[in-house]
Image (spheres, grey):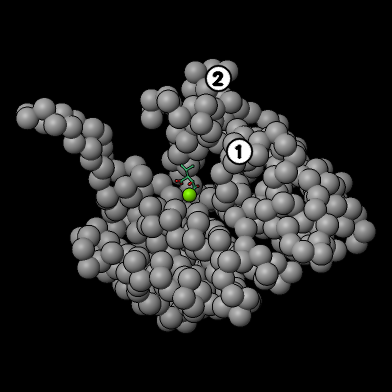
């Protein structure tokens, strides 16, 4: 029996996760031995227990084969000390489970070409995968904090640090992934200014010797940000640090028209994974049934592929999403002229209906 821990979280999290759970039920009906239970994370967990990541949640996550997460955070918890903000729940899961490899695909569904703010001819056929390092770098580096100097002025500081082994293990994931795609890997750094990423570039270059079939290139992050909007199809797989990956993945998401479409997988060395939409908790539309559940549903597909060894079921879910888009169903974030606007639950039901038809 495979165990899945479901963490709805905050804002639109519970609404979109409810739709993804309908898809999990379909997976179980296909004869796969899975079971799931829910636990608290983020602001919802803080309100209930005083911690954004209760010990019980972390223990359950460690014992699960995969974790499905909605989203965390919201204005309600912004005044809290940074150590107990909802985001700490997410970061604690990432580091507690050692989920160092974050895969963030940016794929343009042909039906949504018009939804991008870029010209359709620039984004048509877009299929990029960002491999983001997720448990190191400036997000976790020590020392960090805000201190008061002798002259009474306050100073904030964070540390960007990567060991060779951390760079090598994310590099290997990226090379292996590129191998299964179009065999082009672009490593993004700021090696012209930051020593830490000069080392990053050196280690990536060394690794390339083990993957002669993959073409490695290097790009500075500022240029990469520009190239992503200038000519995004030049990229196949991008590998980068935690912070650069955070920023570039939001940018890449927007190329596809809506951040509401993109799933992600965060994996550790054991193949355990946490799966979540790359968008946030969207407090402005929470509780209104307007959120797009497709990114979360597509996260279930990634879960089937990467942690549950069921790539055929993953394919079917991805095809079903294509089918509902083809039928003209759109949540407000991807609405376009001539399409039919639907709410969160209607969209989830439509995907399940498409799955049942096959
Ligand atoms: C993401 C988010 C998180 C991050 C936040 C919510 C901590 O932006 O998953 O990209 O910065 O990693
Ligand atoms: Mg982000």
Name which quarter of the figure residue 84 lies in. Answer: top left
The label on residue 47 is 2
Q: Residue furthest top?
A: 49
Q: Nearer the viewer, residue 61 or 290?
A: 290
Give left or right: position of 109 versus 217.
right
Name which quarter of the figure residue 182 lies in. Answer: bottom right
The residue depicted at 63 percent of the width and 28 percent of the height is: 39
Relative to 96, residue 126 above or below:
below
Q: Position of residue 337 (x, y in %)?
A: 77, 64
Q: Position of residue 105 (x, y in %)?
A: 57, 62
Of labels 1 and 2, the one closer to you: 1
Residue, disc 1: 284
- Marks 1 & 2, CB-CB < 8 Å contact: no
Dot 1, how many residues are within 10 Å of its Cα: few (below 14), some (14-19), or many (20+)? few
Name which quarter of the figure residue 280 lies in. Answer: top right
Dot 2, how many residues are within 10 Å of its Cα: few (below 14), some (14-19), or many (20+)? few
Relative to 214, residue 69 above or below:
above
- Look at the numbered disc 1 and say if its residue's Cβ is closer than 8 Å to ligand 1: no
Q: Position of residue 261 (x, y in %)?
A: 65, 56
The residue depicted at 74 percent of the width and 62 percent of the height is: 336
* Helix, strand or loop status at disc 1: helix
Give left or right: position of 238 versus 125.
left
Q: Is residue 278 visible?
A: yes
Q: Residue furthest front?
A: 337
The label on residue 254 is none
The residue depicted at 38 percent of the width and 57 percent of the height is: 244
Q: Nearer the viewer, residue 239 or 221?
A: 221
Q: Position of residue 287 (x, y in %)?
A: 70, 33
């Amino acid at each position: 029996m495979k165990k899945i821990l479901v963490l709805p979280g905050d804002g639109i999290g519970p609404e979109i996760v409810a739709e993804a759970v309908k898809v999990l039920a379909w997976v179980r009906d296909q004869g796969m031995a899975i079971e799931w239970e829910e636990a608290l994370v983020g602001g919802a967990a803080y309100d209930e227990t005083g911690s954004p990541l209760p010990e019980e949640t972390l223990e359950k996550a460690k014992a699960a084969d995969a974790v499905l997460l909605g989203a965390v955070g919201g204005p309600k918890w912004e005044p809290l000390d940074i150590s107990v903000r909802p985001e700490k729940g997410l970061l604690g899961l990432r580091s507690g489970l050692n989920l160092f490899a974050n895969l963030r695909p940016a794929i343009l569904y042909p039906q949504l070409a018009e939804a991008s703010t870029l010209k359709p001819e620039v984004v048509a056929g877009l299929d990029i995968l960002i491999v983001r390092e997720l448990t190191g770098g400036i997000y976790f580096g020590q020392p960090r904090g805000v201190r008061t100097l002798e002259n009474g002025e306050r100073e904030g500081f964070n540390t960007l640090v990567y060991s060779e082994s951390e760079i090598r293990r994310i590099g290997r994931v990226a090379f292996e992934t590129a191998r299964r795609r179009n065999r082009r890997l672009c490593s993004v750094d700021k090696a012209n200014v930051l020593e830490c990423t000069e080392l990053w570039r050196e280690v990536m270059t060394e690794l390339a010797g083990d993957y002669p079939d993959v073409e490695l290139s290097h790009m500075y992050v500022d240029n990469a940000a520009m190239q992503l909007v200038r000519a995004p199809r030049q990229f196949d797989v991008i590998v980068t640090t935690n912070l650069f990956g955070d920023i570039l993945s939001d940018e890449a998401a927007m190329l596809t028209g809506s951040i509401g479409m993109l799933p992600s997988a965060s994996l550790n060395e054991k193949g355990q994974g946490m799966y979540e939409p790359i968008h946030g908790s969207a407090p402005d539309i929470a509780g209104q049934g307007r959120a797009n559940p497709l990114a979360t549903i597509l996260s279930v597909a990634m879960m089937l592929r990467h942690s549950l060894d069921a790539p055929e079921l993953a394919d079917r879910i991805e095809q079903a999403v294509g089918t509902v888009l083809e039928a003209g169903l759109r949540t407000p974030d991807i609405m376009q002229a001539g399409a039919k606007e639907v709410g969160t639950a209607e969209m989830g039901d439509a995907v399940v209906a498409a799955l049942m038809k096959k």
